[in-house]
Image (cartoon, helix red, strand yellow):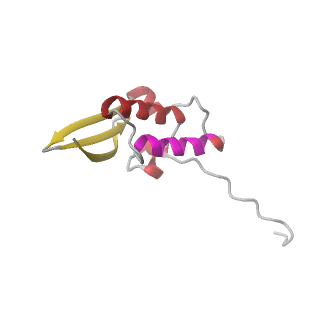
Amino acid sequence: MNTNEEESPKAAEPIKYGDVFSVSGELAAAPIAPQDAAAVAAAEKSVLGVTPRSGVALVMKSAAEHNEQHGFVRHDDVTAAVKESGTEIAETTVVGHRLISESVGGQLLWRFTMDE
């Protein structure tokens, strides 16, 4: 390489489910898409009444915005896992605490507790 040539910056890479969550298979390799984040946000709002700060939906929204800005996904894109299996939020109450589990495509993304 000629010393006068500038190195081009490394192209951005998509943020994938496997970069953010402990998932496997096709889901791990899939870029997080805007409509995935919207689906999780809607599920959180429906079950929890709110979209938690620093919760799964907001993390996914940030990743999806990165992916959209860099051209890896379009605004109306949705991954096959969400399209085929959807999102799930399960809630269990244990001695004054709500145990919340959030899944996409049947794979657990995050589990956390909330006070009742």
Residue placed at 81% from the left, 69% from the top? 1
Nearer to us in this view, 91 or 32:
91
Residue 64 is left or right of residue 23, and the answer is right
- x and y, in percent, of residue 91 in the image: 24, 36
Nearer to us in this view, 40 or 98:
98
Tell me the quarter of the picture where residue 2 sits. Answer: bottom right
Q: Which stretch did the figure color magenta?
A: 56-68
Residue placed at 46% from the left, 43% from the top? 58
Q: Is residue 6 above or below residue 102?
A: below
Nearer to us in this view, 99 or 19:
99
* Residue 82 is inside the magenta segment: no
Dividing the image into 4 quarters, which one contains the C terminus? top left
- x and y, in percent, of residue 83 in the image: 45, 27
Residue 85 is left or right of residue 70, and the answer is left
Q: Magenta region's main secondary structure?
A: helix
- x and y, in percent, of residue 102 in the image: 33, 39
**Residue 9 seen by the camera:** yes
Residue placed at 54% from the left, 41% from the top? 64
Residue placed at 41% from the left, 45% from the top? 53
